[in-house]
Amino acid sequence: MGSMERLRIFPIVLVLASIAAPCAPLAAQTDQNASAAHLKVNLVPQVVPPMPFPPGSETKGPVQPVEFRSVDQMTQKDRDLAADAESSIGERAGFAGLEFNAGPWSYRQMLCPALHNHIFLRFTRNSGSGDVSVFTASIPRNGEGHVRIIPILRRGYSLFSPAPINALTISAFNHIRAEEHPGKIPDWLGTGLCYAALAGAQPETPTAAKIPESRKFPTAVPAKLVIPVGGGAIIQFAEGAATALPMEWTMTFDSKGKLLKATHSPAPPFKVIGVPQSAGAVKSTPVPPTVVDVTGKLVQ
């Protein structure tokens, strides 16, 4: 082949090489896009801890307090159920050493909106100063369950340990809730108030009209529901927030709603300091009082 022929062919080879070179990355990119089009993306769901009282399970509007009724105020049906259970109540009270047959006892009914499938009776025998016996009786309305008692006081003394933190009280409460078979998620604050009542407290919430003007502002920690990272629930509230010395309750539940622990102690005291308007100031919306604790630290 002559030199002229070589000159004609060589430039053609260079041109083909220069054209083919950019096509290689383009082909690779096309293959990658085709592979990516067939990828399946799996969304990882957010892990929600198991909660026996999910947010929003509280009663809409004002919480219904535990209501106390005298025997005359009870319905005839409830009086009949109480009479039918009298022998079982006496037997169980005797096992606890409460001397049910040794003197006159009186009782009142406790209506717990969160546990409406049971009748609760607060039995009291007052033999004078320092000699008072108290216990709570639980009677299932539908017959599916057992009559139970929760000892509170025997002749002025707590049995075993104070009823609010007693393991026997917690056990009885869990059995009562298991017998309830609720059709919906129970109200968490109502559940806490019922436990307090069964353990001997009287968590009645007075209406605003019955609270003195000087005490219409919060003087205790408001009720709250805490959801731990691992699930379950912690209920905290103050019993008798309108009184001078409210008691603070903390109840810890597991993920299935079983009560594990309860504490009961005096709530930290607060004092309310009103902030008056300065003389001659232009009228405006009244300024709410400043709430501080006993050390003078601003609370709100």
Image (cartoon, rainbow, N blue to C red):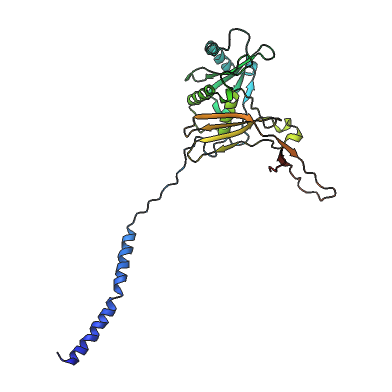
Residue at (26% x, 79% y) in the render: 17
Q: Quadrant of residue 62?
A: top right
Instruction: State the residue in front, 157 or 126.
Output: 157
Q: Quadrant of residue 209?
A: top right
Instruction: State the residue in front, 89 or 1.
Output: 1
Question: With respect to residue 111, does 20 lie above or below?
Answer: below
| Left or right placement of residue 228 versus residue 18 in this view | right
Residue 162 x/y as whole percent = 59, 22
Q: Quadrant of residue 128?
A: top right
Q: Which quarter of the rendering shows the C terminus?
A: top right
Residue 77 x/y as whole percent = 56, 17
| Left or right placement of residue 84 versus residue 243 in this view | left
Q: Which quarter of the rendering shows the N terminus?
A: bottom left
Residue 230 x/y as whole percent = 47, 39
On the question of residue 186 being in view, the answer is no
- Seen from this angle, which residue lies furthest right? 280
On the question of residue 181 being in view, the answer is yes
Question: With respect to residue 31, does 210 lie above or below?
Answer: above
